Amino acid sequence: MKNKLFLLFFSLIVATVQAQSVKSISILGDSYSTFENYLLPDTNYCWYNYSHPQRGNDVVQVEQTWWHQIIKRDGYCLCVNNSFSGSTICYTGYVDKKTGKHKDYKDCSFVTRVPYLGSPDIILICGGTNDSWCGAPIGEYKYENWTDADLYSFRPAMACMLDGVKRHYPTACIFFILNSDLKESINESCSIICEHYDVPLIRLHDIDKQRNHPSIAGMKSIAEQVMVAISLDR
C-alpha cells in the first residue's frame, strides 16, 4: 500500500514538473497566422477558416498552419494567437477605393496589439507583409520618443513595436519572421531594426503561395524554417 501511494505521489510530481516545463508560444501576426476559432480576441479578422475555406488556397485545417506544426512537433503550447488579417505594423492601411486615401489601421496595427499576448516564453512576430503591399510610408529610423504621427510610417512603427514587445515581455524569446517577396525597403528596414533590438530575424525564402497566401506546402516550409531558427537560438 505504501509503495502504491509513493508511486502515485511520485507520478504527480513528475506530471507537475513536466507541465511546468512546457514552453508557451504567442503569435503576433496578420492573415498568414490566422485560423478560425484560434484567435484571441476572436473578433480579429480571419483569412484561413473551416466554415468558408478560401477558394484557390488548399489550407483548410488548423493542423496545416505553420504555427500549429511548430507547436505539435516541438511540444509547445499555444498561449495567445493575436493575428489580424490585413493588419499592418504601422497605422497606415490600404487605400480606400472611394476616397483614394490610405485607411487608418491604428486599432488593428501590430503596435496597438503588443500588450495583448498573454505570458509566453516565446513570441513569434510575423508581419510587414501588408505594410509592403499597401504602400505604407517607409519613414525614417527612430528609436525613441515616437509621436502618433510617426507611427503612420513603417520604420518608426517597427521600432516602436519591438521596443514595446521587449518591455512588456522581458523574459520572452522574441523572433521576427519576414515574408518573402516584399519590397526591398521593407526587408532592409526589418534587418536594421531587428539588429538594433537584438531580435533574431527569420528571412523566409521559397514559400509556395496561392492567392498570395501560403499553401499547404508553403506553410510546411515556413514551419521548417522557423523551427530551425528557434533551435539554433536555444
Image (cartoon, rainbow, N blue to C red):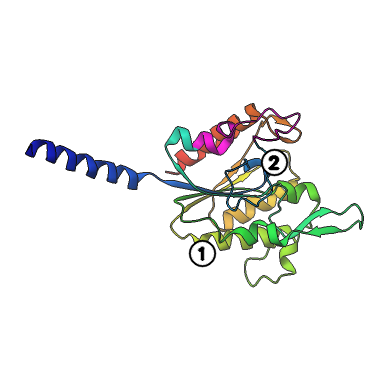
The one of 24 and 16 positioned closer to us in this rendering: 16
For badge 2, the amino acid type reads Trp
Q: Quadrant of the N terminus?
A: top left
For badge 1, the amino acid type reads Arg
Dot 2 surroundings within 10 Å: few (below 14), some, or many (20 or more)?
many
For this view, does 220 lie left or right of residue 106? Answer: left
Q: Is the Cβ of the residue at disc 1 closer than 8 Å to that at disc 2?
A: no
Magenta residues span: 50-70
Q: Does the magenta stretch include residue 58?
A: yes
Query: From the viewer's perspective, is the residue at label 1 or at label 2 nearer?
Result: 2
Vertical order, 174 against 106 (above or below) = above
In the rendered image, residue 141, in percent from the top left (x then y), is placed at 69, 62
The one of 181 and 103 positioned closer to us in this rendering: 103
User: What residue is pinned by disc 1?
Assistant: 167
Residue drawn 46% across the image and 39% down it: 232
Q: Quadrant of the C terminus?
A: top left
Residue drawn 71% across the image and 53% down it: 88
